[in-house]
Image (spheres, grey):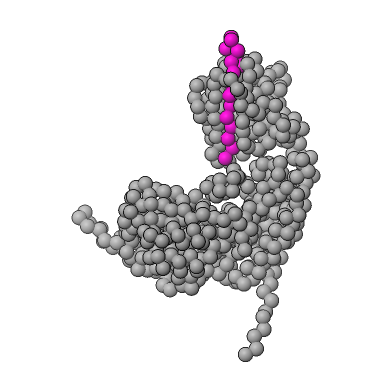
């Protein structure tokens, strides 16, 4: 068979045209939005899907025996299908809608942590976790007698796999919960190897895919992972909607997280039964419009294609690292082999907040601070960094504007 | 390129931010307190030495933070020397108003010395950078060990 490799190109101008906000100017300058890792901008398809649902077919889901409710339920459940397709879930019932990745992690910490893990067992996380993948486990530790272990990160900003494995050696770790891509270092963690090692030691694995799913195709079956979380608003969708995926047998073994309507079978004073998964974990009226928006965002990302997205991001990252390396006194945090378009840096003589304020004056949006990863900051002896992060709509020209402006920032504080 | 930022980053600010005159721990002191801005991670510790009459003789600080917060701590230490604790508290109230509104009262000679910081009013997220050291100073004068600018 003759296989030709088709060049994967992303027409960034066409993509930018889909994002109305990118036509805005900030302080008289074109917006250079390099803060997508915090929250990404929204394409027309997402905006239209949400507005259209409100204008033409809105009602509560799963309850009304009327046309509007049926249409809305179809759209809401259609978003579940889209989310399942996105990460190749075996079964659409494995997709639980939550508010965001933080809620997904809290759900697992609560329902799996208290319902399935036993006191004396341990949860293993890493040093490069977002606070959302630290604090729920600390709460579980303090309430339920679960030990919390932390796998170190190397100077290069990669997971120390040897240390990680040794922390599993005594067989007491019941769950590993690790980021799939660091929101500070841009490092992709070796998910397949993490899962293989953890399973060999009898531990389940949860991956926080908040960043990873934006940039790479995720296949939960190929990864052989047990739990996967991501959030809509970083994936060009709305806020207030995220996804917890878990193997169906795990969801079925877990007690509910929140109680209320929607999540029950029958309710009586003596005894209440739970709905089938995933509804068991979706108490109350869900984020209907946001789920519909997420469905549209997933359609948008699939339309562009992960091959094109990954190739675009690789070229942006390579260009950015080269330009930043040429700036005297600028230090990029981490140098992982496998990394993506999230770049944290410090500039000698200038505090990250001062850097961010100066960049903002030129219309450039970056984040500055500890990025909800204080332990990682301490690991590198820092209190904060500035962070530029790229999206589907980022251009090489915008990276040049960033680098050129940073040279001027350096002069300003020299 | 950053001409329009000169209202915030005046030469005085950049200078005091780079080379604070009072950015050191006092060998002998009567009161001390820490200030913490948990949102951005900025931290300051302030030491105060009183004169025999109870006035502030000297203030020193150690800080990690942005140019605004360091410069503000340094200008504060410079300005409150010779003030009574009550005068320092009253000055902080006027300083905070200035940081929020940008208005400096012409006849206020003490506040006048802090005028370079008036530019923060245009950057609401940075006002707390300018007030952090003051919260620590007041906590020290009140005998509290900790303060926050939240």
Q: Residue at x 20, y 55 (%)?
A: A270
Q: Is residue B50 left or right of residue A361?
A: left
**A295 or B42: nearer the viewer:** B42
Secondary structure character of the magenta stretch overall? strand
| Above or below, comparing residue A177 to residue B133 in the picture | below
Q: Is residue A328 left or right of residue A247?
A: right
Span of residues in magenta: B41-56
- Across and down, in percent, residue A37 comes to 59, 56
Image quarter (top left, top right, bottom left or bottom right) of the C terminus of chain A? top right
- Across and down, in percent, residue A301 comes to 58, 67
| Above or below, comparing residue A155 to residue B76 in the picture | below
Q: Residue at x 57, y 40 (%)?
A: B41
**A364 or A289: nearer the viewer:** A364
Q: Find out whether residue B44 is within the magenta segment.
A: yes
Image quarter for residue A110? bottom left
| Above or below, comparing residue A223 to residue A161 in the picture | below
Q: Find out whether residue A115 is within the magenta segment.
A: no
Q: Residue at x 60, y 70 (%)?
A: A306
């Amino acid at each position: 068979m003759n296989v030709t490799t088709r060049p994967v190109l992303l027409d960034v101008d066409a993509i930018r045209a889909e994002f109305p906000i990118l036509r805005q100017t900030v302080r008289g300058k074109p917006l250079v939005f390099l803060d997508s890792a915090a929250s990404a901008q929204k394409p027309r398809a997402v905006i239209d899907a949400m507005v259209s649902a409100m204008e033409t077919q809105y009602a509560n889901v799963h309850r009304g025996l009327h046309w509007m409710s049926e249409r809305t339920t179809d759209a809401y459940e259609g978003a579940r299908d889209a989310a399942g397709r996105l990460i190749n879930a075996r079964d659409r019932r494995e997709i639980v809608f939550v508010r965001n990745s933080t809620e997904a992690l809290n759900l697992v910490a609560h329902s799996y942590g208290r319902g399935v893990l036993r006191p004396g067992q341990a949860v293993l996380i890493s040093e490069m976790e977002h606070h959302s993948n630290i604090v729920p486990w600390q709460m579980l530790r303090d309430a339920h007698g679960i030990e919390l272990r932390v796998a170190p990160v190397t100077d290069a900003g990669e997971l120390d796999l040897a240390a990680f494995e040794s922390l599993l050696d005594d067989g007491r770790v019941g769950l590993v919960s690790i980021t799939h891509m660091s929101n500070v270092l841009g490092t992709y963690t070796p998910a397949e190897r993490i899962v293989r090692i953890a399973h060999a030691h009898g531990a389940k694995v949860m991956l926080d895919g908040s960043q990873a799913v934006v940039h790479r195709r995720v296949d939960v079956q190929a990864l052989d992972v047990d739990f996967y979380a991501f959030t809509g608003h970083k994936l060009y969708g709305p806020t207030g909607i995220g996804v917890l995926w878990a193997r169906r047998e795990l969801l079925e073994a877990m007690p509910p997280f929140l109680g209320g309507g929607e999540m029950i079978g029958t309710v009586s004073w003596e005894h209440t039964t739970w709905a089938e998964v995933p509804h068991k974990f979706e108490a109350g009226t869900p984020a209907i419009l946001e789920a519909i928006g997420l469905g549209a965002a997933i359609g948008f990302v699939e339309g562009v294609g992960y091959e094109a997205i990954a190739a675009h991001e690789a070229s942006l990252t390579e260009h950015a690292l080269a330009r930043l390396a040429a700036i005297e006194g600028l230090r990029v945090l981490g140098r992982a082999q496998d990394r993506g378009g999230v770049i944290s840096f410090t500039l000698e003589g200038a505090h990250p907040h001062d850097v961010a304020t100066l960049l903002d004056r030129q219309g450039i949006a970056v984040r500055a601070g500890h990025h909800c990863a204080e332990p990682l900051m301490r690991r590198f002896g820092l209190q904060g960094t500035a962070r530029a992060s790229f999206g589907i709509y980022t251009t090489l020209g915008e990276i040049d504007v960033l680098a050129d402006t940073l040279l001027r920032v350096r002069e300003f504080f020299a | 390129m950053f001409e329009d930022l000169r209202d915030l980053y005046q030469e005085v600010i950049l200078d005091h931010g780079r080379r604070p005159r009072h950015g050191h721990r006092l060998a002998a002191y009567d009161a001390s307190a820490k200030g913490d801005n948990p949102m951005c991670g900025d931290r300051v510790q302030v030491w105060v030495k009183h004169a025999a009459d109870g006035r502030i003789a000297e203030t020193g600080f150690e800080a990690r933070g942005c140019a605004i917060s360091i410069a503000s701590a340094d200008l504060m230490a410079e300005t409150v020397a010779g003030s009574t604790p009550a005068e320092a508290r009253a000055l902080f109230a006027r300083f905070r108003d200035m940081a929020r509104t940008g208005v400096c009262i012409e006849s206020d000679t003490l506040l006048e010395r802090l005028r370079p910081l008036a530019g923060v009013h245009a950057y609401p997220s940075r006002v707390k950078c300018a007030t952090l050291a003051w919260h620590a100073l007041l906590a020290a004068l009140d005998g509290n060990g900790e303060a926050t600018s939240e």
